Image: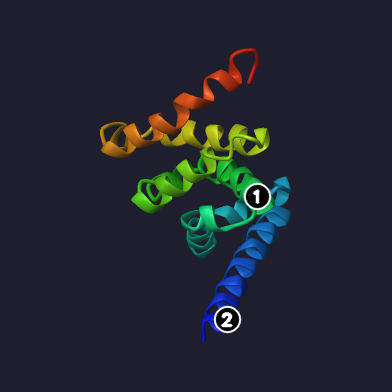
Amino acid sequence: MEIEARDELGVEQTLRESLIKAFMVIFTHNSSQHLLLNRDLIDIAFNCLEFAEEIAEEAQEKLAKLISIIFKFPQVQRFILKREIIIGVTELLRVHCNPNIVKDTIRAVTYISMNYEFVNSSLSLEMLKKLMPLLKQFENNHD
């Protein structure tokens, strides 16, 4: 019974990672970025973000790139204030050893931080706490 439960979780994780990779193939092409405005696709991307801590680093890197793209759209910004989404973003900030994840996640955070409701919430403090340890990483960097 326990083995079946672990296998089921592994299948869910693999499926989630495959979805993220498929998104990146589609959405990194400029001619396909208009698809990002589809509400169903946005929901799937946000669902993947809610489980950011459970996916492999390669999928986290692609997810960070994806959110750095979709968070700039005004149609998406109204949905990014869900607590689960913010927690997913902060989980991506924990991956200090991968500069691509950090860079793309920080780009996504800049879009979040432009929202007054976010800045005025307790979630902004949680995000700031995750960003502070990264300052040393960027001291000699032009990013």
- Image coords of residue 69 (percent x, y): 59, 42
Give residue 3's mark: 2
Amino acid type indicated by mark 1: Glu
Give residue 66's mark: none
Looking at the rendering, which quadrant does residue 35 occupy?
bottom right
Please identify, in this view, whether the residue under mark 1 or under mark 2 is nearer the observer.
Answer: 2
Amino acid type indicated by mark 2: Ile
Mark 1 element type: helix
Compared with residue 14, is residue 56 higher up or lower down, i.e. above or below? above
In the picture, measured across the screen, residue 82 lies left or right of residue 63, that is left
- Image coords of residue 34 (percent x, y): 61, 52
The residue sitting at 55% across, 37% down in the picture is 105
- Kindly indicate whether the residue at mark 2 contacts the one at mark 1 (C-beta within 8 angstroms): no
In the picture, measured across the screen, residue 114 lies left or right of residue 4, that is left
- Image coords of residue 90 (percent x, y): 46, 41
> Depth check: 8 or 103 in front?
8
Looking at the rendering, which quadrant does residue 67 occupy?
top right
Q: How many marks?
A: 2
In the picture, measured across the screen, residue 61 lies left or right of residue 40, that is right
Question: In the orientation shown, which residue stands out farthest toward the bottom?
Answer: 1
* Quarter of the image with the C terminus in it: top right
Badge 2: few (under 14), some or many (20 or more) residues near its Cα, within 10 Å? few
Badge 1: few (under 14), some or many (20 or more) residues near its Cα, within 10 Å? some
The residue sitting at 59% across, 19% down in the picture is 138
First reached walking from the N terminus: tag 1 or tag 2: 2
In the picture, measured across the screen, residue 115 lies left or right of residue 58, that is left
The residue sitting at 64% across, 61% down in the picture is 17
Question: Would you name the residue on which mark 1 appears?
Answer: 57
- Image coords of residue 29 (percent x, y): 73, 48
The residue sitting at 57% across, 81% down in the picture is 3
> Depth check: 21 or 25 in front?
21
